[in-house]
Amino acid sequence: MDRFVILMLGVLVGTLPSYVGDLGAEVGAEEEVKPVYVLVSAEVKSAPEGLKAYSDAARPLAIGAGLEVVGRIESVSDELVFEGSWSHAGGITIERFESMAAFESFWYSEAYQAAIPLREGKVDINFVVAVPAV
């Protein structure tokens, strides 16, 4: 389909942003690998030394997958919520991984799955959400 027609269809159905990024793509060109941002909301229940075994097991795996901690806050206060409400106990961490494939490879690996029980009873996870970069 002609790129102009795709662009106009995007304008008409309100999906222009999804088409604009593809307009410069060449046919047969490799797809760009985009980072993924992982939002983790959790409440730490134990002293940091209680999480040492989990950290020792999980951290090298995450770093190997390209982990970069972008932001972290131990508690989300009302002053930081600009719209809506924050109903979760604990804080939030924003992590960046090289790609969704790298994150999923880490997350579903046997080694990481074996590390998860090491945090049980020490951290309550509210959610883990992976958001691909645009």
Image (cartoon, helix red, strand yellow):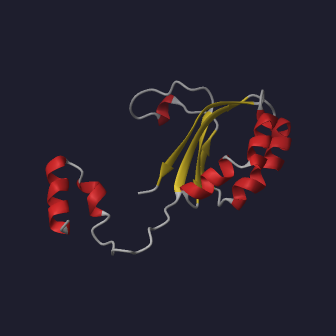
How far from the left and from the top, in percent, is residue 32?
45, 68
In the image, taking residue 17 as reference, residue 79 lies left or right, namely right
Up the image or down, 97 lies above or below 29; here it is above
Quarter of the rendering occupied by the C terminus:
bottom left
How far from the left and from the top, in percent, is residue 84?
40, 28
Front-most of residues 59 and 71: 59
**Is residue 69 among the parts visible in the rendering?**
no
In the image, taking residue 81 as reference, residue 71 lies left or right, namely right
How far from the left and from the top, in percent, is residue 27?
33, 74
Quarter of the view holding residue 53? top right
In the image, taking residue 72 as reference, residue 35 lies left or right, namely left
Up the image or down, 79 lies above or below 9; here it is above
How far from the left and from the top, in percent, is residue 44?
72, 32
Front-most of residues 52 and 118: 118
Q: Residue at x 45, y 26 (%)?
A: 85
Q: Residue at x 61, y 33 (%)?
A: 75
Quarter of the view holding residue 63? bottom right
Quarter of the view holding residue 1? bottom left
- Kindly give the residue lying farthest to the top in the view shown: 87
Up the image or down, 16 lies above or below 29; here it is above
**Is residue 8 among the parts visible in the rendering?**
yes
Q: Residue at x 24, y 51 (%)?
A: 15
